Image (spheres, grey):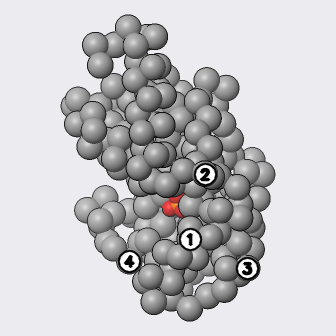
Amino acid sequence: MIIAIDGPAASGKGTIAKRVAAHYGLAYLDTGTLYRAVARDTLARSRDPADADEALNSAKALDPSTLGDPGLRKPGLAEAASLVAKHPEVREELLAYQRSFARAKSGAVLDGRDIGTVICPDADVKLFVTATPEERARRRYLELKQAGIEVSEAEVQCDIRRRDERDKHRAAAPLRRAPDAHLLDTTNFDIDAAFKAAIDLIDAALARAGHAG
Ligand code: DC
């Protein structure tokens, strides 16, 4: 069974995806870490993430054993990750790893921007998780504050909007809801309510498709 979860930054999709994977006993891949790792390796060589050849070199040399690096979640890498993710050749290079992860063993949950549209268009269930830009900025701001990172909520909102615009309007695999993805708006939900809403949508979709559960 493959569950595809897409959505914009700080929509709650990562937390939901992780809990959904644990609930159904599936493997979990946060595909954002792939682009973040390519950005990390490009910057580590003092190269420009906007340079397609440099980003492709990092994607080709990517060592999947480094994907657990906690440094990948650093807010400073988000912008560079969005820049490397614009290059079609980088996306193409990362495709096989994501597809083979999805097909492994008992199934998987993948979250990202193009899982339901490009990586796993035949996923058993697709969710598109979203929330208003204001709410997403508020959540990211609180997360950063808790991590001791000083930044204003307005700055966070500006960064999120810029990144979403780039992710939505790029030519290669833009962020968009697959026509058959279930919309989950988490604006008024805390994480437990969002997780429950996700499980309800998935269970209903599986029942309709005749899955055993
Ligand atoms: O989910 P995240 O914030 O870790 O993602 C960082 C960037 O990576 C995001 O701005 C766009 C890119 N990305 C992508 O283009 N496709 C994916 N499947 C996942 C992430």
Disc number placed over residue 188 in the picture, else none? 2
Name which residue lies at 48% across and 66% down: 36
Q: Amino acid at mark 1?
A: Arg
Disc number placed over residue 140 in the picture, else none? 1
Q: Is residue 50 above or below residue 168?
A: below
- Quadrant of ligand 1 in image: bottom right
Disc number placed over residue 154 in the picture, else none? 3
Residues under labels 2 and 1: Cα distance?
A: 15 Å
Residue 168 x, y percent position in the rendering: 73, 51
Q: Secondary structure at mark 2?
A: loop
Residues under labels 4 and 2: Cα distance?
A: 30 Å
> Which callout, 4 or 2, points at the residue further toward the start of the chain?
4
> Which callout, 1 or 3, points at the residue further toward the start of the chain?
1
Query: For this view, does 27 lie left or right of residue 121?
Result: left
Q: Is residue 57 above or below residue 76?
A: above
Q: Is residue 20 visible?
A: yes
Disc number placed over residue 71 in the picture, else none? 4
Q: Amino acid at mark 2?
A: Asn
